[in-house]
Image: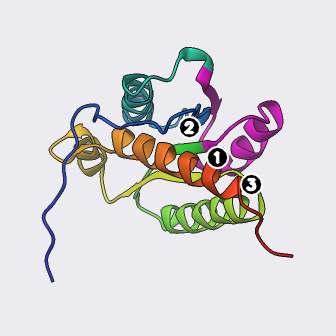
Amino acid sequence: MSTELQVISQAQDYQLADGDTPVVGIVVSDWNPQITGTLRAAAVEQLKHVGLSEEDIKILEVPGSWELPFGVKKIQMLHSDLTAIIAIGSVIKGDTRHDEYINSAVTSALMQISLVGNTPVILGLLTTEDEQQARDRAGGSHGNKGYEWALSALKMSQLKSQSSKKRIGF
C-alpha cells in the first residue's frame, strides 16, 4: 500500500476551537543548530499563524537530543499551564552506533513522560542517515517537519482539553 508524500513547507490554516487557548512548550536541542533552529522557527511560525501569542509559546534550549527528556520535565515544572510540548532534536548517523542508542532512549523516555504526565509530548526528533536527509526535512525537499509537529501539538492540545472536561475512570 503506497501513500502520497505530504510535504508541508509553510504554515497551514488550523481552526482553534472556541475558547481553546493552547499554551505550547518547545524544548529544542542546540546540537545541529542549522537543523534544529530551522525546525524550531517553523514550529513557532505555525503556532503564531493560528493565533498563539509569544506568551503562549514557551521555549527551553538543551545541549543535545539526549537532554530532551530532562528538558521536557523541566519545562513542565516551569510552566504548569502547558497543553502540549514539542521536543525538537536532530540525531545524524555517524561512524558508530551512538545514534541508535540515543534515538531509542530519547523516544522511549519522551513517550513515558507523555503517558505518565498529563501533557502530550510531540516527538520532533529527526533520525537521519546523513546531514542532507536532515536538511531535506528542515525546509528542503521534504518540507519542514516543524510545521507538522506544531499542528500535532495543536491537535493534541485540543484532545487534552476535551478529555479534561470528562471524567475518566472511577
Q: For the magenta stretch, what is the residue range?
A: 56-84
| Disc 2: which residue | 29
Point out residue 15 in the picture as x, y percentages from the top left corner.
Answer: 38, 37
- Secondary structure at numbered mark 3: loop
| Residue 22 seen from this side | yes
Quadrant of the image occupied by residue 36: top left
Residue 114 placement, left or right of 80: left
Question: Measuring 53% from the left and 62% from the top, which residue is drawn there?
Answer: 103
Residue 68: mark in rendering: 1
Say whether marks 1 and 3 touch (CB < 8 Å). Answer: no
Q: Nearer the viewer, mark 3 or mark 2?
A: 3
The answer to which of marks 1 and 3 sits earlier in the sequence is 1
The residue lying furthest to the top in this view is 54
Q: Return the residue found at the far bottom.
A: 1
Q: Is residue 155 magenta?
A: no
Q: Position of residue 71 (x, y in %)?
A: 71, 41
- Quadrant hosting residue 107: bottom right
| Position in image of residue 169 (x %, y %) | 80, 74
Separation of marks 3 and 2 at Cα, in angstroms: 23 Å
Q: How many marks?
A: 3
Report the side of 9 relative to 106 (left or right).
left
The answer to whether residue 89 of the structure is visible from this angle is no
Tell me the amino acid under the disc marked 3.
Asn
The amino acid type found where label 1 is placed reads Leu
Per the image, the residue denoted by label 3 is: 118
Q: Earlier in the sequence, mark 2 or mark 1?
A: 2
